[in-house]
Amino acid sequence: MDALLLVVFAYLLGSVLFGEVVAKSKGVDLRAVGSGNVGATNVARALGKKYALLVFLLDLFKGFFPVLLSRFYFGLDSWTTFFVGLFAFFGHLYPIFHGFRGGKGVATAFGVLLGVSPFLAVLSLLVWLLVFKLKGYVSLASLSACTFAVVLSLFLLPFKLFLMSLIIGVFIFYKHRDNIKRLLEGTELGFKR
């Protein structure tokens, strides 16, 4: 029962779209600005870097905190941690509080990874920063870091958590399908370096 409650808590916390909450507090409809996404990247376009960083950290926390609780009470290599990580992530993608219309989940996925393996999370962040610096595309940096994290999780994490990483990675690519198309066409929105 405790495990089930923690999974439900992870999903409900994940369902809070902090990008929308922060933007609405500033009188901005985030879905009508830029890419229409509710994540930190679009917050940066609409409100600036300060609010983008706030949203990124809050979205990261949604993934990190439930996984940390699960590790403490149920252990790292447990099905509870597997489901807690997935449902925190799915909460952001399909939030019950926002009509099941969520974001792409990169910051929340990073929070889950940070809760599971800080070492792997830091390496993935370095990959993200490198690709973003070289290319200037958040989407490409996110997809590159995601791929890197999934591949390394096969070697560094218990199988259950590799499976969790793989499922999260598949959904991140699915949510970025329009970005991938635009990247291939050369029409993706980028940030000036």
Image (cartoon, rainbow, N blue to C red):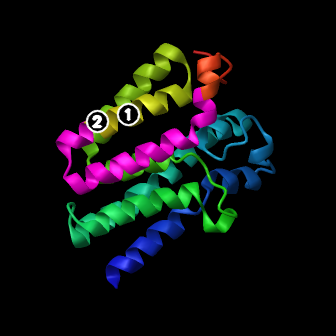
- Which residue appears at 54% of the width and 42% of the height? 174
Which residue is under mark 2?
151
Say above or below: 139 vs 12: above
Q: Position of residue 187 (x, y in %)?
A: 68, 19
Quadrant where the N terminus sits is bottom left
Report the amino acid beneath label 1: Thr
Task: State the residue at coordinates (66%, 47%).
Answer: 38
Please state if 56 lies on the left or on the right of 146 as rendered.
right
Q: Is residue 188 visible?
A: yes
Residue 160 lies, with reference to residue 129, above or below; the image says: below
What residue type is disc 2 on? Val
Expressed as whole percent of the image width and height from the top left, the position of residue 82 reads 32, 61
Label 1 Cα neighbours within 10 Å, binned few <14 / some 14-19 / many ≥20:
many
Location of the C terminus by quadrant is top right
Q: Is residue 122 visible?
A: no
Range shown magenta: 152-180
Please identify the quarter of the rendering in which residue 169 is found: top left
Is 38 placed left or right of 68 in the picture? right
The disc label shown at residue 115, or none: none
